[in-house]
Amino acid sequence: MPVAAGLKVLVVDDQNSVRQMTRMTLEQIGVRHIHEAENGKQAIDTASLQPLDLIISDYNMPEMDGLGLLRAVRGHPAARRVPFILVTGRGDRELVVKAAQAGANNYVVKPFTADILRTKIEQVVGRLS
Amino acid sequence: MSSLDQLKQTFFDECSEALQQIETGLTDIREGHGDDDTINAVFRSVHSVKGGAGIFGFEGLIKFAHVFETVLDAMRSGKLAATQDIIDVLLPANDVLSDLIAMSRAGEAIPANHGAESHAALERLLGANSVVGDEGDDNTPAEDFADLDFMPIRSDAFDGAEEASGGQSFRIVFRPGPDLLKRANEPLYIIRELKKLGELDLVAETDRLPPLSELEPDRAYVGWTGTLRTAATRAQIEEVFEFVVGDCELDIAVDMAPLAAIDAEPLAVAAAPIASMAPVAPLAEHPAPSIVPAPTADAGEPPPPRAAAPKQVATTMRVELEKIDRVVNMVGELVIAQAMLGQIVHGLPEESSSRLAQVLDEVIHHTRELKDSVMSMRAQSIGAVFQRMPRLVRELATKTGKKVRLEMHGENTEVDRSIIERLGDPLTHIIRNSIDHGIETPQDRLAAGKNDEGTIRLAAEHRGGRIVVEVRDDGGGIDPDRVLKKAKAKGLVSPDAVLTEDEITNLIFLPGFSTAETISDISGRGVGMDVVRRNIQDVGGRISLKSERGRGMTLQLALPLTLAVMDGMVIKVGGQTYVLPMSAIVECLRPSRSDIHNLLGGRGMLRLRGNLVPLVHLCDLLDLGMPTDSDERVVIIADAGDGTRFGLIVDELCGHQQVVVKSMEESYGTVPGVGGATILGNGRVALILDVEKLSDLAVSQTSPLAAARVGSTDQQVAMVVN
């Protein structure tokens, strides 16, 4: 059973406020190792530099959006196995379908509570003890 | 402030950026130079506002942003064309969004009907084109799409596939040729890049390394051999060596030692969600090419996309303003300490000080650069002020029934933030004036043979150590007859005064002047151009005006780059030391006696290259008593700020130096003629004179005595400094 405190999570969002909010939510769940990236490029760099247990990425970002990042991650030799949760807006069904096709492990709809995020993460990495 | 409050602040800061982006984007589209990227960027900005608003729970903001976003989405997907009519709905919508953000920021309750009109207009756009109606799921719980049957992929699926690199093993031999370094290539970088591809195990071959005495530093001697375990293809590996292929011995071969087959699993990962999703488009159209690393390296295969080679590190960071201000202050102190050091070095006997003086020169040079760098940190682009203007113009145009187009140039010009903060009000006022009094109604414009749409051009640029901001309109300009009549009626000029057209237009800067026959709520009440001028002067700027009757007018604001440190000329007069801002000094000279004339009315005049320049004794102006007669007296030709020049007679020029401006207003209030104080190298305080106000003082107290004294100054030598 994975321990929340042991998870290494990368949060990707171009909006600093949203990133920080996600970080706070993750901290509530008990996650301690949180990396941040504000765009796809940074995310790939971070993912290639250290082993990650999870990437939580926003969809709506300039230059490389969340789907682009997902595809890049899945094509990256070092990072392609890292579980990926895509953060989407409400009502965007098409996007969720696309994300699934591109290899996303799960999605979460913004805004989310700590409980929702925890459930989503558990569905991906297994129950958190 | 709790961390949540801090996050909200961050969010609102992001909103300001988003608003500006929306404004710029929509304006670009309206002007016809927008493309898909523009509309996408606008959409993203609105979407970000909505997303953040959702997280922080600003309901009113979410609702409005949602409709706004839906319209933009329809536009970017081509369901709605970006016509003028639509942009005319979107721009005001951005204003409403801006209001809602401001209200949310201030914690005010948003009135239920606020922006209702704009909201309705947006919905009409959607309705008229039968795009997605109101989404409805705004109120559904966040946990939606249940019907999609999205099966989350457990990461347990990855168990047993531990090694992050995987793939296959390559044997690599890399021996740089002798010239590789000379062609500016660096083996270390290549090895680092290789390492990024997977697990790298290299051994250096040092056998070609010569004894140290024979070693040429720019020649490569060391080679490497080893293995790389990677999921990358041979083509990807070769790409790393792309720039050195001709300059090295390179051999990349598949290492036959078999590795655990691991490629089945990621495929399953990709396939699993697809299998579990019923309503999905045909899969074949969406192959996931990047997921499948080729089990055998095939050089012909197109390399899968990978992270762009040059590593991008974050290039900006946020620093608290206070910290930067502290550095600015420290640099100020450093400038003072350095001036003191200079003074001491100057007093030493030359044989012992020459080396010291050299080093000091270097220190001065570095301090100057340090100062410039710190100042550039404080600098902000003037766009921060400009961004408020489009909305102002739109609103005023609607109110007055005029058609006005705003052009902005040089938004990226950087200005010290202390000046930015104080530029907003004057600019707002000038633009109000332009629309209220300058730009004519469409009918009048057509009648005058002009385009019915007026143009206001707002521009900023660096020019000669200052920032010049220009507001130009193509309206009716200033009517000199009307201005003169008004000024006479108000007793601002004597009834029989004869003034040039330029002098008349400049009357509008006089306190208490307002040409509007009726006071409108646009140009404000009782606040005239004199206040604008005062504001600009308060930050050490100058304002000048050019008007062409019937063709428009131009207001030019010349602002200093910074308020904290400035270039000053240290002077002595009547035994006291003062500093004059270099920016106001045109030249310094010792005129010959024959060039000085006494005119009727007691003014001394200096003949300078054919022009007459009025002369003033600084001694008199500052009330320092009778000027001492000296042969060494110097005349400083100064610019009074409005382009007029006058000569200041001083006793001595002590030199040019950077001075730190310390404000005195808090302690002493405003002293006419004094702009601040500074600390000199000898540790003494010197007053910084305000040349513009000195010129005003000179006009009001020209004494016949001064002229007489000028006449007695003999044997003067010309020395043009500037």
Image (tube, coloured by chain):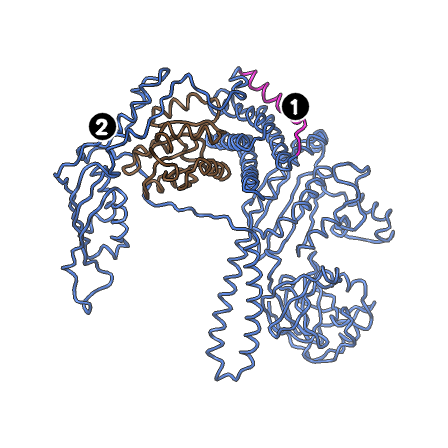
Q: Is residue B470 left or right of residue B523?
A: left
Residue at figure coordinates x 77%, y 73% from the top left: B624
Mark 1 packing: few (<14 Cα in 10 Å), some, or many (20+)? some
Residue B139 location, quadrant: top right
Which image quadrant: the N terminus of chain B?
top right
Looking at the image, residue B136 lies above or below residue A38: above
Mark 2 is on which residue type?
A: Ala
Q: Which mark is residue B264?
A: 2
Q: Nearer the viewer, mark 1 or mark 2?
A: 2
Instruction: Kindly state the secondary structure of the residue where label 1 is placed.
Output: helix
Mark 2 packing: few (<14 Cα in 10 Å), some, or many (20+)? few
Residue carrying label 1: B117
Mark 1 is on which residue type?
A: Glu
Marks 1 and 2 belong to one chain: yes
The first of marks 1 and 2 along the sequence is 1
Residue numbers of the magenta segment: B108-129
Q: Is residue B375 left or right of residue B310?
A: right
Q: Is residue B664 left or right of residue B255?
A: right
Q: Is residue B526 left or right of residue B28?
A: right
Looking at the image, residue B206 lies above or below residue B457: below
Residue B302 location, quadrant: top left
Looking at the image, residue B419 lies above or below residue B31: below
Instruction: Give the chain letter for brown.
Output: A
Residue sitting nearer the eye, A14 or B308: A14
The answer to if B705 sits in the magenta stretch is no
Chain B colour as displayed: blue
Residue sitting nearer the eye, B270 or B709: B270
Which image quadrant: the C terminus of chain B?
bottom right
Instruction: Kindly state the secondary structure of the residue where label 2 is placed.
Output: helix
